[in-house]
Image (spheres, rainbow, N blue to C red):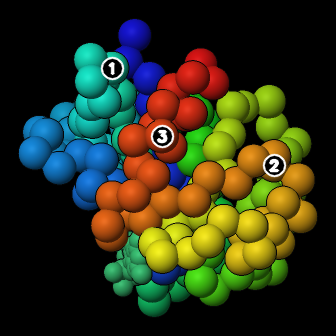
Amino acid sequence: FKPVVALIGRPNVGKSTLFNRLTKSRDAIVADMPGLTRDRHYGNARLGRREFIVIDTGGFEPDASSGIYREMAKQTRQAVAEADVVIFVVDARAGLSAQDHEIANYLRRLAKPCLLVANKAEGMREGAQLAEFYELGLGEVIPVSAAHGQGVRSMVEAALDQL
Ligand code: GDP
Ligand code: MG
């Protein structure tokens, strides 16, 4: 059993940066997995001896006629459906947005393991800047820096421990 971990969140929070870090030096994109669609990115990742598949979302055309938000919502739902555990990424620097609340409302209604991760948290003291994310009602907020690698290992451990 290779668990599937989906990265979801609004644009620009750092999902793809996190995806690249998790899949770096691995076999990159899983191009030929039956049943998985092309508009999401799949990659192999490993932590120690634990292997898992990561799904990145948001690789769509921003000017698609269907509209960016509808397409994002669709991709998010599909990735969540395929995932064993969901990593919901928010931006520790930008703070909470209306879209974060929408995604959180959606996730809270699902019976699916979910981890709330505040990215871009390099150089931040825990506490004050992360406190507002507890409003989302998804439990503990895990600070990470996808760009610098901080917290990424503990994040993966926490995600896989939910299985
Ligand atoms: P996505 O739209 O969620 O896939 O976000 P991206 O991975 O494309 O990143 C959006 C922007 O945030 C880019 O300019 C990244 O360089 C930046 N970024 C990603 N991770 C971090 C981080 O850990 N710290 C900081 N300061 N910037 C980051
Ligand atoms: Mg992206």
The image quadrant that residue 92 belongs to is bottom right
* Quadrant assignment, res 94: bottom right
Residue at 80%, 37% (x, y): give it: 110
- Separation (CA) of disc 1 from disc 3: 13 Å
Q: Earlier in the sequence, mark 2 or mark 1?
A: 1
Label 1: few (<14), some (14–19) or many (≥20) C-alpha neighbours in 10 Å:
few
Quadrant where the N terminus is found in the figure: top left
Indicate the secondary structure of the residue bearing disc 1: strand
Q: Nearer the viewer, residue 93 or 124?
A: 124
Decide if residue 151 is on the left or right side of residue 104: left
The residue at the point 80 percent across, 30 percent down is 111
As rendered, which of 59 and 50 lies closer to the eye? 50
The quarter of the picture where residue 128 lies is bottom right
Which badge, 1 or 3, is on the more N-terminal residue?
A: 1
N-terminal of the two: label 2 or label 3? 2
Whether the residues at callouts 1 and 3 have beta carbons within 8 Å, the answer is no
| Residue 79 placement (x, y as % from top left) | 53, 45
Q: Which residue is mark 3?
A: 154
| Residue 98 shown left or right of residue 113 in the figure | right
Q: Which residue is mark 1?
A: 50
| Camera sees residue 58 | no
* 1 vs 126: above or below: above
